[in-house]
């Protein structure tokens, strides 16, 4: 690639970063304003909690159920036509593993479903859909501008940060959200676009919604040794509360899954539970932002504090576990703020020397950060989030101590964060380092190679002939009860006539196979001791599906851990499947390219392209990233802006930008 081509590529990427940031922020601003306007139109107040405090009891009961029902109907309609959406888990998988795609249409449908539930009083956060749409916009920008897969993944992370920053007016916390939760690793090529995205999104949010922090300017201080020491207790307590909240969500999901009703009806049932609670405690409705402000002001006192500490998690569990679309990030902050306020009120009545409202507010802020850290396992993000949302840096020391202790407590009790549990439900392990995650994302079915499977009754002499004819080394056979035996070509070469008359089933060596779901670390351990450098892969019936070899394992490590398309490349046939790892000829690559300008107007002749450029054109796309790929032999006249899916030597791809000869017309 020439210097000019590299400069043009960097410029396109910079444009994509800015466009992704602007679109992600604009969408978040529109959703925030839309929720407030819709609430005002329905209930006469822009804030859900204030509206429910003035509503009759029967409206409080019915409204969340109706909104959840409508949201559930939208989700059911989307599920029938669009790829499945798993929220932030989809973003994490796409950014880190490069698997799948965050569907923009599915994310928009999920946002519409979430808005219906939140506006009507559902106990849900709005951050999940906003983050998912921001990421999807990044992926769409990457596709439209022709970005490489690696840069498209960076745009997904940029959109994630933009959505988070615009939702909470917290650019640094948004950056840390991507680092600690989404990617789990600090890489300069990711950090710079993410920081730019968060900064641009925050600027747009402040221009349109105001410059004040999300929860207003605060001026707290825990100055005496007693106050500082007492605040640290919020760390372990916040960790415990976060774990109990996650367990409550899991139990609620298991409970609602037993209800044999359509999704919309289950969601309506959850909304009915929220409505029943809201009759006495309207503060449980919505995402919890309004009551958190009251808690930070120290205005919630007495039994109301304890009631909110119990009722809000129950309401959120009823909404989320029943199937309503939405996040639990802000409800987690509500839980932490309630916990902190309860502890501060108890300490205040015990005689600690402090001004009550400021003391309760400061504990609410620290408790809020502690529970967020416990549920996300991201202490730095939770710390920065707290002082960015309050504009108060004075509490940074107790915040750091509480979030660290909360994270340690939560990890000791439950290894998975709330997002790690979401990944597990998707079938993706998220424990360990980035290398571990990448390795565990590769399974035996991804690197399956052809095996020579012969009848168990075949004499070894015929087996030897088959091995020689096919230039294979090992032959396999399935015998009784799904057991697998194998023979080696070299061993057969030394066998005498009597041994050659034995059958494969009788004379073969028993082999312990692996299964398609075995991951790369498991395959590595097994192949280390494999006698022939390969292992058979069997299905549930014990039938041999193929083999996994040490050579294939090395190629998978090179592709997935080193992120190179040098030995193997990943081929994906649909959004619902992760694809297969395919070996290309040495120094070959496969990827999309822009159709050369001098080919425009003529009929595409793949043979002529092969002669002139050294590339095989496999498919053609006209009309942008959403257009389908067409067979290159039936694509017709080359149009301006056409994209070709080509395969060939790497130097042919690099020469393409310097070519000046005209392709022959077909």
Image: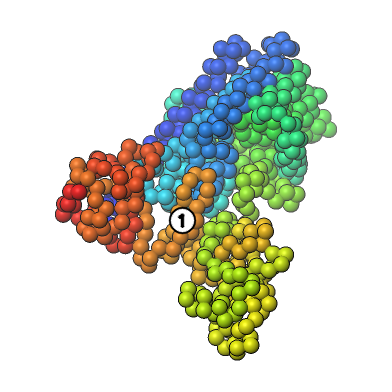
Q: Is 193 positioned to the left or the right of 604 in the image?
A: right
- Compare residues 456 and 242 and report the one nearer the observer: 456
Q: Residue at x 48, y 46 (%)?
A: 574
Badge 1 crowding class, 10 Å Cα cut-off, few under 14, some 14 to 19, many 20 or more, is some
Residue at the extreme right of the image, as rendered? 350
365 is higher (above) or lower (below) than 119? below
Q: Residue at x 60, y 89 (%)?
A: 496
Assign the N terminus to one quadrant of the image. bottom left
638 is higher (above) or lower (below) than 587? above
139 is higher (above) or lower (below) than 348? below
Residue 640 picture quarter: top left
Q: Is residue 227 visible?
A: no
Give how far across and how far down residue 314 sits, in percent: 75, 30
Q: Residue at x 56, y 28 (%)?
A: 77
Residue 225 picture quarter: top right
- Compare residues 11 and 632 and report the one nearer the observer: 632
Q: Is 308 positioned to the left or the right of 539 in the image?
A: right
Q: Residue at x 56, y 77 (%)?
A: 463
Q: Is residue 326 visible?
A: yes
Give how far across and how far down residue 487 sits, in percent: 60, 77
Give how far across and how far down residue 392 sits, in percent: 59, 34
474 is higher (above) or lower (below) than 436? below
Q: Is 306 positioned to the left or the right of 397 in the image?
A: right
- Compare residues 119 and 181 and report the one nearer the observer: 119
SS label for mark 1 = strand
- Compare residues 134 and 632 and report the one nearer the observer: 632
Circle 1 sits on which residue? 570
Image label count: 1
Give how far across and how far down residue 9 sits, in percent: 31, 49
């Amino acid at each position: 690639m020439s210097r000019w081509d590299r400069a043009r590529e960097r410029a396109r990427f910079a444009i994509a970063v800015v466009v992704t940031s602007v679109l992600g922020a604009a969408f978040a601003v529109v959703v925030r304003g839309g929720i407030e306007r819709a609430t005002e139109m329905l209930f006469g107040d822009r804030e859900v909690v204030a509206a429910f405090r003035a509503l009759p009891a029967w409206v409080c009961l019915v409204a969340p159920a109706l909104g959840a029902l409508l949201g559930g109907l939208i989700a059911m309609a989307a599920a029938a036509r669009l790829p499945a959406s798993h929220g932030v888990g989809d973003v994490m998988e796409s950014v880190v593993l490069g698997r799948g795609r965050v569907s923009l249409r599915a994310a928009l449908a999920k946002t519409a479903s979430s808005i219906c539930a939140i506006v009507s009083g559902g106990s849900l956060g709005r951050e999940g859909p906003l983050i998912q749409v921001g990421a999807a916009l990044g992926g769409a920008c990457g596709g439209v501008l022709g970005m490489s897969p690696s840069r498209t993944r960076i745009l997904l992370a940029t959109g994630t940060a933009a959505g988070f920053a615009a939702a909470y007016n917290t650019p640094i916390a948004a950056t840390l959200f991507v680092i600690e939760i989404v990617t789990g690793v600090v890489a300069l090529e990711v950090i710079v676009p993410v920081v730019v995205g968060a900064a641009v999104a925050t600027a747009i949010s402040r221009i349109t919604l105001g410059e004040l922090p999300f929860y207003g300017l605060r001026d707290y201080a825990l100055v005496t040794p007693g106050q500082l020491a007492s605040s640290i207790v919020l760390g372990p307590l916040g960790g415990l509360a976060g774990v109990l909240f996650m367990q409550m969500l899991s139990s609620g999901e298991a409970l609602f899954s037993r209800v044999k009703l359509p999704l919309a009806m289950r969601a309506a049932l959850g909304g009915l539970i929220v409505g029943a609670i809201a009759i006495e405690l309207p503060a449980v409705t919505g995402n919890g932002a309004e009551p958190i402000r009251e808690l930070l002001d120290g205005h919630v006192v007495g039994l109301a504090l304890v009631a909110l500490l119990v009722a809000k998690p129950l309401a959120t569990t009823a909404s989320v576990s029943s199937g309503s679309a939405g996040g639990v990030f802000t409800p987690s902050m509500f839980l932490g703020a309630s916990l902190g306020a309860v502890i501060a009120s108890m300490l205040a009545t015990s005689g600690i020397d402090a001004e009550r409202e400021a003391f309760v507010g400061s504990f609410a802020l620290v408790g809020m950060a502690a529970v967020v850290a416990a549920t996300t396992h991201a202490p730095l993000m939770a710390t920065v989030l707290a002082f960015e949302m309050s504009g108060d840096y004075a509490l940074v020391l107790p915040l750091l101590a509480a979030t660290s202790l909360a994270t340690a407590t939560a990890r000791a009790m439950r290894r998975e964060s709330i997002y790690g549990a979401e990944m597990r439900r998707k079938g993706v392990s998220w424990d360990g380092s980035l290398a571990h995650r990448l390795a565990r994302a590769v399974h035996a079915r991804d690197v399956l190679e052809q095996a020579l499977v012969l009848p168990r009754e075949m004499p070894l002499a015929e087996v030897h002939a088959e091995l020689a004819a096919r230039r294979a080394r090992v032959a396999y056979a399935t015998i009784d009860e799904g057991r697998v035996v194998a023979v080696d070509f070299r061993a057969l070469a030394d066998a005498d006539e009597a041994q050659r008359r034995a059958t494969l089933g009788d004379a073969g060596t028993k082999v312990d196979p692996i299964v398609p779901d075995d991951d790369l670390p498991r395959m590595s351990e097994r192949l280390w001791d494999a006698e022939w450098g390969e292992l058979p892969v069997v299905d549930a019936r014990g039938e041999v599906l193929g083999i996994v070899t040490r050579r294939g394992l090395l190629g998978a490590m090179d592709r997935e851990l080193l992120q190179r398309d040098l030995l193997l490349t990943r081929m994906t046939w649909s959004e619902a499947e992760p694809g297969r790892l395919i070996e290309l000829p040495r120094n070959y690559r496969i990827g999309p390219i822009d159709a050369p300008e001098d080919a425009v107007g003529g009929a595409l002749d793949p043979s002529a392209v092969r002669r002139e450029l050294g590339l095989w054109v496999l498919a053609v796309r006209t009309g942008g990233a959403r257009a389908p790929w067409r067979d290159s032999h039936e694509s017709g006249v080359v149009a301006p802006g056409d994209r070709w899916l080509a395969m060939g030597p790497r130097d042919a791809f690099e020469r393409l930008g310097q070519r000046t000869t005209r392709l022959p017309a077909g």
